[in-house]
Image: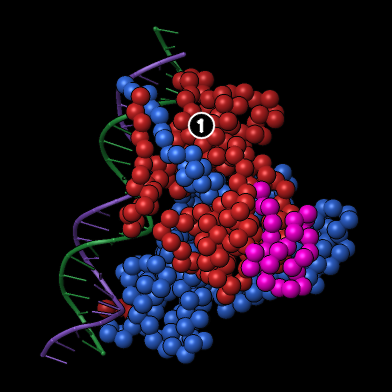
Chain colours: A red, B blue, C green, D purple
Amino acid sequence: MVIDINLSNLAGPKLPNPPSIPQPSLARLPQYHHYLVDLEARGITRISCSQIGGDLGYIPVQVRKDLQYTGIIGKPKTGYSVPELIRSIETFLGWNNINEAFLVGAGNLGTALLGHERFSKFGLRIVAAFDTDPEKIGLWIHEKAVLSLDQLSDLAQRMSVHLGIITTPAEAAQAVADEMVKGGIQAIWNFAPVKLRVPENIIVHNEDLYSTLASLSWKLARRFNVPIQEKEAV
Amino acid sequence: MVIDINLSNLAGPKLPNPPSIPQPSLARLPQYHHYLVDLEARGITRISCSQIGGDLGYIPVQVRKDLQYTGIIGKPKTGYSVPELIRSIETFLGWNNINEAFLVGAGNLGTALLGHERFSKFGLRIVAAFDTDPEKIGLWIHEKAVLSLDQLSDLAQRMSVHLGIITTPAEAAQAVADEMVKGGIQAIWNFAPVKLRVPENIIVHNEDLYSTLASLSWKLARRFNVPIQEKEAV
DNA sequence: TAGATTGTTAATCGATTAACAATC
DNA sequence: TAGATTGTTAATCGATTAACAATC
């Protein structure tokens, strides 16, 4: 048995924790999961990579590689056990252990996330919201209290909440992130269109709607405004 | 002058329209844009790649390559003109021409997007919402009417709306996409965690929150449950 | 057994980074 | 001019895909 403990966490300017799975593979796992849960509901117990790939639009090898990262072992000729595969993905992603989270920014988007019950199936429970607007502080949104941002770092420490969600305007995001770090929060899910400056060891994931919007509008513009590109001849 | 018209749009199983800019670069452009607008507001008129990179956490070459795709030309020694660069990015992304969009799924997330005024600065105007829930049809959310999904394809054609936003539950998403395609919609911004099956020529971008959540929970789990990986010795 | 499917190693492809030339 | 910075070509790196071996 080979035990492989990675302690390179504290140093390293580029790889704070060399991921043993490529980011794109990681991002595809929930998609397989969703698909498999649906299969299971329909009573299907075994599945092959080609079948999964065919249904989701990937080539079989890619599916196989992705699934292998979760540690699943398939049987030649018959494929994988659907329930086993589901459990394997859930365990791998840590969806069995609930992460409690604080959300900052009780605007439209924040409210939407607070009301998203389904997150609890995927290891996420938002336990409280925070804001700086006195009109919002004291409200309850989807059964969660809206507290003053001042209380965040203290409460995060006392409740050992280690996940923070930022749904504030861009201008406020950095200050919120600073508060979160002060409170010992380990990971930040950032919906504000800003690159946050945080210590090395804090995990940050951006959900930047404007990036997607940029791609969409570029492609639409390209399609409608006839794709002509001018270049100065040399 | 070299004119380069790309007509490979209709065929090609892999490259429906070979992008002349890598997807990651495209996704970074809005970030530069945001940063530059802020600079401009502070009265700064010229900027170098190393400065931008230093502030946003990229190396200078990468910034330079990204910006070059927009067609901007800089001056050695002095860098780029801030206002020119802003305009260059906006033109490149097509943010000057407004895209009108239909949104389907007037739940929490849909409501949040309907209320997001800032989108209009980035070429997006959501003109109406749709739903199948009779309780919602007829309502007005953030000054936009909620109509019956039945009306979508007809209205999309008559108003030549070519962008659709899906904020329905996973189960409903495919049917909605089908309606959109029927109505002649060209591009879909999909927030449902499902891989949509649409014709080749339809542009689809997924905003899959569960992908991000997967990454976050995997990394958190990895951090807290001591990163030990067992492998069977050979 | 034969053949389908997993598992694994090698080749390809695209994005990032490095090295260097051009220019103000 | 000298030096900073852009522009461009080459090298590197990581993810995807192809080729093939192992196995039920």
Rendering quarter of residue C20: bottom left
Q: Position of residue A46 (x, y in %)?
A: 58, 23
Chain where mark 1 sits: A
> Secondary structure under badge 1?
helix
Quadrant of the drawing holding the C terminus of chain B: top left
In depth, the one of B121 and A199 nearer the eye is A199
Quadrant of the drawing holding the N terminus of chain B: bottom left
In depth, the one of B185 and B210 nearer the eye is B210
Q: Quick check: A3 above or below B138?
A: above
Which residue is located at x 36 percent, y 52 percent?
A10
Q: Position of residue B72 (x, y in %)?
A: 39, 79
Q: Quick check: B83 above or below A191?
A: below
The answer to whether residue A95 shows anywhere in this view is: yes
Rendering quarter of residue A129: bottom right
Q: Position of residue C5 (x, y in %)?
A: 48, 24
Is residue B200 on the magenta stretch?
no
The reply, left or right, for residue A11 in relation to residue A120 is left
The answer to whether residue B8 shows anywhere in this view is: no
Q: Quick check: C24 above or below B233?
A: below
In depth, the one of A182 and B140 nearer the eye is A182
Q: Amino acid at mark 1?
A: Ser
Which residue is located at x 58 percent, y 51 percent?
A160
Graded by Cα atoms within 10 Å as few (under 14), some (14 to 19) or many (20 or more), the crowding at tag 1 reads some
Q: Quick check: A65 above or below B71?
A: above
Which residue is located at x 68 percent, y 25 percent?
A43
- Residue beneath label 1, please? A50
Magenta residues, as a range?
A125-151
Which residue is located at x 64 percent, y 54 percent?
B191
Rendering quarter of residue B130: bottom right
